[in-house]
Image (cartoon, grey):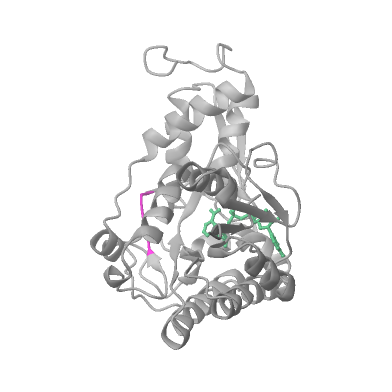
Amino acid sequence: MKRESILVIGAGGQIGVELTAALRRIYGDFNVIAADLQIPPGTRDSAGPYQQLDVMNKSALASFVAKNHVTQIYLLAAMLSATGEKHPEKAWQLNMQSLLHVLDVAVEKKVSKVFWPSSIAVFGPGAPAKDCPQDAPLVPATVYGISKAAGENWCKYYWKKHGVDVRSIRYPGLISHLAKPGGGTTDYAVDIFHQALAKQSYTCYLRESSFLPMMYMPDAIRATIQLMDAPAMKLSVRTSYNLAAMTFSPAQLARSISRYIPDLVVGYAPDARQVIADSWPESIDDRPARHDWGWDHEYDLSATTRDMLLHLAQKEGVAGKRSLQLQPDVFF
Ligand code: NAD
């Protein structure tokens, strides 16, 4: 019998490292292939297979999918919002062409399911800032957002026209202790933890009152797998689902971290990323995801802060230092 495989493209990135590990726990190490331009640091030591693959090379992608009997593709390769504004044409090329290659290969090689993430960046200044609904108008202000809005429509088109079962989530800003973020506007919410532990100070490139929708990575991974497992007939959204967990400002995150690191000093020096942040909603209404496939988040701001510090303090060996007021009963 042919062995069927799941292919994760962009497996070395912030989401890819954790998603690959989670899929391997469910489907077995050797049934999940981690693919990226370079050897992903988080996956090279794990038991499962790794493939060097450029998703922009369509024929290489097609023959790899056929040879390895790939039945599901998770496409995570992309250029994110802040980097995309520096290289708009490259961002458009990578974000669009990678998706079209995967959708075409899915049709040609009869891949049964595709996952492709969208983002809250599809919403622009015209969308409601609070509890932005699923069907708010998509008038994005960045090249990244334009590519995600167009990609959502391509997903729906391939589903309707070719029957490709492609599923998608509009991720909010994601916070993870494992992989560093890859050039997004919400990266501060990861960097602040590293700097708080290393030197008890951080200069934030967003205003202290800049509220954005955020999610802890374990919730994002769980949502992704839950959506991919949901019966097709339950899915009413074939562009991309709004998804929410929490919303906070840099000042609120700094206060939450200060509970454990009272010496923490945070300054604010908004740069070009503030303009991007200002174009995005502050919070998201994700009722269709909750209704259709039972989405529910587990991590709020305080649970995220605690878990991030727990993991990073252990990893970076700073537990016990004066600067980190660990509460042994709560923390270690
Ligand atoms: P990332 O930048 O950390 O990782 C992307 C990975 O894709 C990198 O490892 C990169 O080497 C790889 N890649 C780039 N070009 C490639 C190519 N031509 N062929 C193969 N691999 C290539 O990104 P991420 O944060 O993990 O995001 C993954 C997806 O989720 C993206 O589509 C992104 O838009 C979306 N998303 C992320 C966030 C977030 O906060 N991280 C939020 C919303 C949406």
> Is residue 121 in sight in this rendering?
yes
**Residue drawn at (54%, 44%) of the image:** 18
Res 137 → quadrant: bottom left
Q: x, y percentage for residue 176?
A: 53, 41
Q: Looking at the figure, which quarter contains the C terminus?
A: top left
Q: Is residue 41 left or right of residue 18?
A: right
Outermost residue toward the front in this view = 1
Question: Percent x, y for residue 211?
Answer: 43, 52
Main SS, magenta region, reads loop
Q: Going 41% across and 85% down the picture, which residue do you hit?
A: 160
Q: Nearer the viewer, residue 82 or 46?
A: 46
* Vertical arrangement, residue 252 with respect to residue 244, above or below: above
Count of numbered badges drawn on the protein: 0
Looking at the rendering, the stretch of residues picked out in magenta corresponds to 242-246
Q: Between residues 156 and 228, which one lies in front from this camera angle?
A: 228
Residue 171 lies, in percent from the top left, at: 46, 58
Q: Is residue 169 above or below residue 62?
A: above
Residue drawn at 53 percent across, 43 percent down = 189
- Find residue 98 and report its image quarter: bottom right
Q: Per the image, is 188 magenta?
A: no
